[in-house]
Image (tube, rainbow, N blue to C red):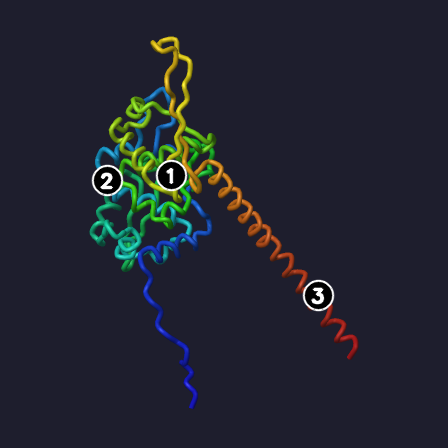
């Protein structure tokens, strides 16, 4: 007697990295968009420190990790089937940073206190939905869908940030400067900022900025290629005793460079247009198939 279940075998359980990768793949976007208002308030005439600075000061690294992953997975999350906290914990865990369901609960609670998310228990899971990134508590819309919202413009975080493990290698200062670099190199390939301006521009201390740059400088994308690229330029300065001063230009290496991110967005938009075109053509093809079927039936009836 043959066995109808032959060949059916149990599969190995997914690791946290594997679960995270599956969700990111199902999002079918390649990057997480985030409004720049999270990093810096848009009005240059007022204080520029925004939500990121407040989280850095409060040392809410876990909350930041949960916040960024939520925005990365948003297209793949099902409101009718919210994830259990234990699933979030597994995806957020790393070898040196284990999360528990309680850690996740406290992280999302901190985000709700900052008006960045809305929490709602649902079944065995917790439905977590983003609110506007500026912390105003306004209803969230996907960045780019409404040009009139506060903090025009958004940065994108390539999924490589999670799939390569970079998220697990950076501490809070590194993550803060990484987000600042992504924001400031959205249109320009390089960014220049004197460390002394970190406080007035972003609300973070000089020490935090220095430590953050140090982490980005230490992380190797490939052998001999660090994440942070730097070039010193001597510019003429009539106030300097030497007649010039040093300006440091900084950039992120691929796949986080301005050019790589722009190309990633272009490919994603092209794929979306192809999908929309295919979906728009389906009704027409269905009508055409129906007319063809009706004509074939009429011919068959006439022949009989």
Residue 297's quadrant in the figure? bottom right
Q: Can you give x and y, in whole percent of width and height, for residue 93 in the image?
A: 27, 52
Label 2 vs 3, first from the N-terminus: 2
Disc 1 versus disc 2: nearer the observer: 1
* Residue at the disc numbered 3: 292
> Which secondary structure, mark 3?
helix
Q: Is residue 14 above or below residue 183?
A: below
The location of residue 137, given as percent across then percent down, is: 32, 37
Image mark count: 3
**Residue 9 rendering spot, x and y as whole percentages:** 37, 74
Task: From the image, tell me which residue sits under label 2.
Answer: 60
Q: Are marks 1 and 2 in contact (CB under 8 Å)?
A: no
User: Circle 2 — which element?
Assistant: loop
- Residue 212, how many percent across, how many down? 29, 34
Q: Residue at x 33, y 55 (%)?
A: 17
State which mark lies toward you, 1 or 3: 1
Disc 1 and disc 3 in contact, CB within 8 angstroms = no
Q: CA distance from mark 1 to mark 3?
A: 58 Å
Q: Using the image as rendered, state which of residue 159 and residue 233 is in the foreground.
A: 233
Residue occupying the far front of the picture: 224
| Image quarter hosting the C terminus | bottom right
Q: CA distance from mark 2 to mark 3?
A: 63 Å
Q: Mark 1 and mark 2: span between their CA atoms?
A: 24 Å
**Residue under the point 73% across and 68% down:** 295
What residue is at 55 percent from the left and 52 percent from the top?
275
Identify the residue position indicated by label 1 in the image: 227
> In which image quadrant can residue 68 be found?
top left
Question: Residue at the right extreme?
Answer: 303
Q: Is residue 138 above or below residue 106?
A: above
Badge 3: few (under 14), some or many (20 or more) residues near its Cα, within 10 Å?
few
The disc label shown at residue 198, or none: none
């Amino acid at each position: 007697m043959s066995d109808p279940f032959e060949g059916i075998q149990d599969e190995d359980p997914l690791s946290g990295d594997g679960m995270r990768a599956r969700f990111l793949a199902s999002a079918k976007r390649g990057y997480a968009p985030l409004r720049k208002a999270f990093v810096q308030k848009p009005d240059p005439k007022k204080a520029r420190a925004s939500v990121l600075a407040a989280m850095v000061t409060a040392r809410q690294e876990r909350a930041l990790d949960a916040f960024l992953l939520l925005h990365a997975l948003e297209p793949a999350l099902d409101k009718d089937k919210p994830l259990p906290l234990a699933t979030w914990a597994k995806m957020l865990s790393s070898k040196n940073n284990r999360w528990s369901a309680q850690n996740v609960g406290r992280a999302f609670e901190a985000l709700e206190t900052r008006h960045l998310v809305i929490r709602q228990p649902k079944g065995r899971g917790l439905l977590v939905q983003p609110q506007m990134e500026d912390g105003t508590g306004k209803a969230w819309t996907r960045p780019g869908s409404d040009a009139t919202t506060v903090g025009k413009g958004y940065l994108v975080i390539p999924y490589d940030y999670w799939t390569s493990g970079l998220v697990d290698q950076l501490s809070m200062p590194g993550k803060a400067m990484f987000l600042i670099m992504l924001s400031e190199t959205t249109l320009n390939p390089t960014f220049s900022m004197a460390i002394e301006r970190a406080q007035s521009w972003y609300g973070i201390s000089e020490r935090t900025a220095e430590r953050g740059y140090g982490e980005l400088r230490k992380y190797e994308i490939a052998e001999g290629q660090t994440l942070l690229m730097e070039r010193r330029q001597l510019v003429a300065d009539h106030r300097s005793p030497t007649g010039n001063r040093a300006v440091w230009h900084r950039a992120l290496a691929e796949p986080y460079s301005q050019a790589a991110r722009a190309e990633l967005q272009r490919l994603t938009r092209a794929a979306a247009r192809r999908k929309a075109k295919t979906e728009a053509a389906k009704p027409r093809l269905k009508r055409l198939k129906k007319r063809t079927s009706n004509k074939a039936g009429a011919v068959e009836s006439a022949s009989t």
